[in-house]
Image (cartoon, rainbow, N blue to C red):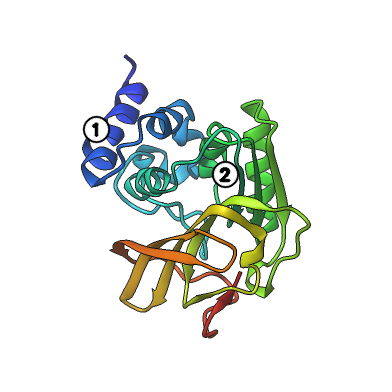
Amino acid sequence: MTDIQQARQNAIDSQIRPWGGLNYIANNALKSIPREDFVPEAYKNLAFADIEIPLNDRAKMFSPKIEGRLLDALNIQQNEAVLEVGTGSGYLTAVVSKLCKSITSIEIDEELSTGSQEKLKALNINNAQLQVGDASQGWQSNDFFDVVIVASAVPKITGRYFHLLNVGGRIFVVEGTGNAMSAKLITRISEHEWDTKTLFETHLNTMQGLETAASFEF
């Protein structure tokens, strides 16, 4: 096993699994995508560290343990369509592409989106569609999704676009402000019923455009 392969395995064994990331298929997907290729040059040596790696002055990557935990909670299936709000580095996009039928990923920063597109192309990933757009202002789609991943914190999520989620669909979102933030799994259990489960306390940057808003309408 090479040093980089060992580092990938160590991230699974010492960060992800102890923190509740126990989904074997998801962990294999995390291991199969070269995280180090998605990390900015200045942070290459920290690719597998238990930190949120900065991508620019506004965006950060999830730490490996949060990636593992959210994938465990969502339990994405091969026949499912996924919406990702915030492409960021494109690493999680690439990982999720291995687990689902298709993934649509929206990113406000055109430079990040373009860089992610190039990396996905280099890995021959063809079931991911990347779009540049401001999700904080609402998002229009004719498609329906089984899974939504919101990759930054929102003050409060409200349901203007919840109809885009199929019954049985799940949303991962970090909700709250300041130091009072918690990761939640919201499941659509019927046409008008939703189940919300709090997963863990954390702290992420607030979604660009929502810094002074009271809610995020999905």
Q: Nearer the viewer, residue 26 or 49?
A: 26
Q: Quick check: marks 2 and 1 in contact, CB under 8 Å? A: no
- Residue 43 place in picture, x, y as percent: 41, 45
Q: For mark 2, give the secondary structure.
A: loop
Quadrant where the N terminus sits is top left
Q: Which residue is mark 2?
A: 90
Which residue occupies 44% across, 68% down? Answer: 205
Q: Which residue is mark 1?
A: 13
Q: Nearer the viewer, residue 42 or 124?
A: 124
Q: Nearer the viewer, residue 119 or 75?
A: 75
Q: Amino acid at mark 1?
A: Asp
Query: Is 88 drawn above or below residue 79 in the view shown?
Result: below
Query: Is 76 drawn above or below residue 110 in the view shown?
Result: above
- Residue 41 place in picture, x, y as percent: 48, 42
- Residue 212 place in picture, x, y as percent: 53, 85
- Residue 80 place in picture, x, y as percent: 60, 40
